[in-house]
Image (cartoon, rainbow, N blue to C red):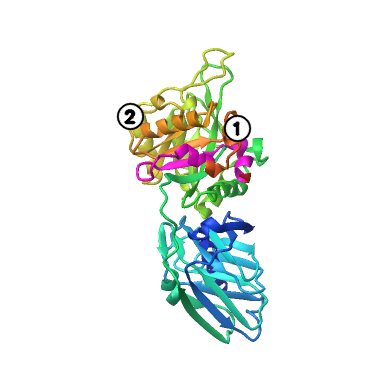
Amino acid sequence: MLKKVLRAAAVLACSAGILSGCANSLTEAEGTSDFGARAVASGSQPNHYVEVKATSTSGWDQTNKFQFKLSNLSIKSGDAVSFQIYTPENASKLTVRGVSSESKWIKDVAVSGNKWYSVSTTATANETEIGITVYCTAKSGLTVRIGDLKVASTWIAANSLKGNVKEYFASPKSFSVSTNDSGSINPPAPTDSPIKWAGVRCSDYGAEDSVGVPQSKGEKWGEFALKVNNKFKNTTPVAIWIVSGFEDSKKTHPTAHLNFNAGSSLPSYVKNGSGDPNTSFLNYADKNGISVWLQVESGDADILKLAKIVMDKYGSHKCVKGFGVDMEYYFSHRSSKSNSDYYGQQMKDQTAKDLVKLVRNYGSNNTVFLKHWKPSIMPPSYRDGMIFVIDTQGKSSLSSYRQEVQDFAKAFKGNPVMFQIGYNDDKSIWGKLSVKEFAEELTKGLSSSSYNIGIVWVDFTLQYALDH
């Protein structure tokens, strides 16, 4: 039980990193956990904080760890958690885990003593307690401070946490909790960003182009999605995960080539794959709050039958939020052997309705996305349970790029829209900006009250997004 609580305590400490006041003063990344969470050095002290003091005659248990937990919280799996923490003298590492689930949210992140850190992470399970473990070598007295806590969109003032701090380490000589109330709560001034998701696209044919990691290395791709998401504030990590490619050998009927083995008796124009390169990623996404849409390039396959194959195989994963269709390859044919361009056909309203109904058999809140650069290829009027993704490329300027993606978003106002970006053809536009800067340029002028936007960076150039 002690081990569980200590792990939980560590989770809280790491989540503190999203607090305002810290966000604008981050200067040095000290460490990153296995799950994309982070502890970043911050020079500023929050306006108020809860202070935990203890003394001991023999160090902080047998492994020199100072451990405590915060109780009576309400945290749901997938919630962003953040706060600031002040480390004690001789501190070396910080760990944060969920108490009831024993989930590792942040593990052994390197820190220094006597320094404020901003900590941010994503809850991987529902929790009412989170624990903090600080590794240190102090033998007499120890002080740790924690600023205001943010869980999802809710701020909890540090002074209200005082009664929730509980001791959890070996034989302390004394243990006390106090608060400093020198100012108001720390959340930043509200921003009007419409960006709600951020993450990656991954396909078996593009996965190795930039990062050199095949699609089958699921945990690495999960880390990539978290790392891109961590470049934004208050967003949910997302992945467009492609499970069938478009195969056209200049024949009459292009096929959907699955990247997994779906057994025998497949419908027409569906080709079987081998093995299973998807489950390791989905397992990781389940544990780390990544929202996943499973996408197909369907060719001439019956889209309802194809969706059923995919959702029967993977729809039970809690990370799977729905199904997606790249409309460029939806009943798409080349006009000649020399023409490599595809366009696709418009999906009928009834087909879209039936597709949403089918996908919601696997989760009542599941959605279907359709992807293309032309609004006219989408169903004429059906919109319930739909997300629309634009994957335009080859733009002449940032302003023309912005204009096209915003026109697309406005065409589907009232529905979530995702921008799939980062194509090599546009490197002259995004190559001088960070991922966050480019996304903010594209969404400039779109209000959060009217639009829910996702930012999805393609696998073909993903290394740039990870580095910038």
Foreground residue among 380 and 315: 380
Question: Which amino acid type is marked by label 1?
Answer: Lys
Residue at mark 2: 350
Question: Residue at horizontal 56%, vertical 46%?
Answer: 228
Q: Position of residue 319 (x, y in %)?
A: 48, 49
Does residue 40 sit above or below 413 in this rendering? Answer: below
Kindly report the distance in space between the C-alpha atoms of the residues bearing marks 1 and 2.
Answer: 39 Å
Residue at mark 1: 427
Is residue 461 visible to us here?
Answer: yes
Q: Are marks 1 and 2 in contact (CB under 8 Å)?
A: no
Total numbered circles: 2
Q: In the structure shown, which secondary structural element does the residue marked by tag 2 occupy?
A: helix
Query: Counting residues from the N terminus, which is met first, the one under dot 1 or under dot 2?
Result: 2
Q: Position of residue 33 (x, y in %)?
A: 61, 58
Question: Which contiguous range is marked in magenta?
Answer: 438-466
Does residue 349 sit above or below 367 in this rendering? Answer: above
Question: Residue at horizontal 46%, vertical 57%?
Answer: 77
Q: Is residue 103 magenta?
A: no
